[in-house]
Image (cartoon, grey):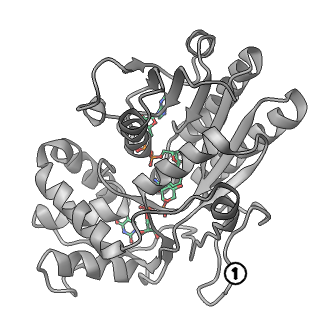
């Protein structure tokens, strides 16, 4: 395809989107301009975009459901990478409405503008669209696995994936989709599992483990997610779906004990709390297609090292996460979690 002179990144002030903007701005100066479109919900923070190379990145504060704004930004874009979403399962159980709005109607609004201006579109999605696997099932998810989402969050992500596929087939929109496993790394909101436990310990609170703690997540460092999205955006085949994962399956209790150990705490020093309703048991990604077709390889293959660096990042960035901590824990307290 043509040069990427103007890249629009939705949700670029959130966890994965901001990591992606840093990754691109630092490694691909040939991308002339990056326009971040972000509503700055509770999950978005303009500070996530601090420290970027001068001049190349502009933050537009706005909603992906605002058709006039989206039309104006995409009229000038070569490509759009779509990270913006309501992203947290527990919030979707407490109040699903914003998930329908942002994840479904927001994606529809972007697709309509990409259709109008023939903008290359990359849709960032999740492995959760495939539902869950049993702990003893040797299978992993592939691009052929049927959709079977469990939560309000994952069902709205599944719906958005379906819209993208339909816009490709019906209107010839030049789009790709990626479904990635659980990310960890810097700038992740304190509502999510790993940052919540690290910051609980740093606040003198006990970590909180749901259910029996045996649920399995397939962890990938967010920097490896960024490199995979870049490969798909620049070299992937239009109309295709690529699964992104880095062979990082681990039970929640193992991850929690690794955090406790790394922070010099007793590995039993945590609370068991009530389980998430509908809690998916296990996710696992088979990333063969991405590796074979695009030659992608993860760099962060040592989970304990990635976890140690992440713990250090939260230790050194208290001012970044402290303002969100109390409100997050109040939300959890209301849910009994
Ligand atoms: P996040 O919640 O940290 O960030 C989401 C960002 O989107 C925030 O900056 C928020 O302000 C913005 N946003 C929300 N609604 C918006 C709207 N209506 N208009 C404009 N901006 C809006 O989420 P994240 O964890 O960085 O996830 C990013 C994407 O990656 C999501 O699409 C998510 O489904 C997907 N994903 C996440 C993971 C994970 O482990 N976190 C794994 C796979 C896929
Ligand atoms: O305090 C907690 N205790 C706990 O045991 C929290 C917050 C979570 N958990 C468990 C639930 C999950 O089994 O840890 C696991 C991970 O939980 P989350 O961080 O909420 O992630 P998950 O529900 O797996 O979804 C994440 O990965 C897929 C992202 O939030 C999604 O956006 C992404 O699509």
Q: Residue 17 placed where, x, y %?
A: 44, 40
Could you tell me which quadrant the N terminus lies in? top right
- Looking at the image, residue 216 sits to the left or right of residue 284; the answer is left
Quadrant of the image containing the C terminus: bottom left
Q: Residue at x 70, y 58 (%)?
A: 293
> Compared to 267, does 192 lie above or below?
above
Q: Is residue 325 above or below residue 160?
A: below
Percent of width and height locating residue 231 = 58, 46
> Does residue 123 appear anywhere in the picture?
no
Q: Spot the residue most to the right.
A: 170
Q: Which residue is mark 1?
A: 139
Ligand 2 in which quarter: bottom left
Q: Is residue 237 above or below residue 209?
A: above
Q: Nearer the viewer, residue 134 or 227?
A: 227
Total numbered labels placed on residues in the image? 1
- Name the element at disc 1: loop
Q: Residue at x 59, y 18 (%)?
A: 77
- At label 1, counting other C-alpha atoms closer than 10 Å, the crowd grade (few under 14, some 14-19, many 20 or more) is few
Q: Can see residue 182?
A: yes
Answer with the quarter of the image where residue 53 lies.
top left
User: Viewer-proximal residue, 63 or 151?
Assistant: 63
Image x and y of residue 229, in percent: 56, 46
User: In the rendered image of this protein, does residue 175 appear above or below residue 137?
Assistant: above
Provide residue 76's location: percent of width, then percent of height. 59, 11
Q: Is mark 1 within 8 Å of ligand 2?
A: no
Residue drawn 18% across and 77% down? 262
Instruction: Left or right? Give the position of 270 relative to 154.
Output: left
Residue sitting nearer the eye, 167 or 222? 222
- Residue sitting at 75 percent across and 61 percent down? 143
């Amino acid at each position: 395809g043509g040069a990427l002179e103007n890249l629009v990144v939705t949700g670029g002030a959130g966890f994965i989107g901001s990591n992606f903007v840093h990754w691109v701005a630092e490694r691909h100066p040939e991308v002339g301009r990056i326009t971040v479109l972000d509503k700055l919900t509770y999950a978005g923070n303009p500070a996530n975009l601090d420290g970027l190379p001068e001049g190349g990145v502009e933050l537009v504060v706005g909603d992906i459901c605002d058709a006039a704004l989206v039309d104006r930004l995409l009229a000038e874009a070569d490509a759009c990478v779509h990270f913006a979403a309501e992203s947290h399962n527990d919030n979707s159980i407490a109040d699903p409405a914003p998930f329908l709005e942002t994840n479904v109607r927001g994606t529809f609004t972007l697709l309509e503008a990409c259709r109008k201006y023939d903008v290359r579109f990359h849709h960032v999605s999740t492995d959760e669209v495939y539902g869950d696997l049993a702990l003893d099932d040797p299978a992993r998810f592939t691009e052929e696995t049927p959709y079977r989402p469990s939560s309000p969050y994952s069902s709205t992500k599944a719906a958005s994936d379906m819209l993208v596929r339909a816009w490709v087939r019906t209107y010839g929109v030049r789009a790709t989709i990626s479904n990635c496993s659980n990310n960890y790394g810097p700038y992740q909101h304190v509502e999510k599992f790993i940052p919540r436990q690290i910051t609980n310990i740093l606040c003198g609170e006990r970590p909180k483990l749901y259910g029996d703690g045996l649920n399995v997540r397939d962890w990938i460092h967010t920097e490896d997610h960024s490199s995979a999205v870049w490969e798909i955006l620049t070299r992937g085949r239009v109309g295709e779906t690529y699964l992104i994962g880095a062979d990082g399956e681990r039970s929640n209790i193992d991850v929690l004990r690794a955090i406790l150990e790394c922070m010099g705490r007793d590995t039993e020093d945590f609370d068991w709390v009530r389980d998430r309703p509908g809690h998916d048991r296990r996710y696992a990604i088979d990333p063969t297609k991405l590796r074979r077709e695009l030659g992608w390889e993860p760099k962060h293959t040592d989970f304990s090292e990635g976890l140690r660096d992440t713990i250090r990042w939260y230790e050194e960035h208290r001012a970044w996460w402290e303002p969100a901590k109390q409100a997050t824990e109040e939300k959890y307290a209301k849910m009994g979690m």
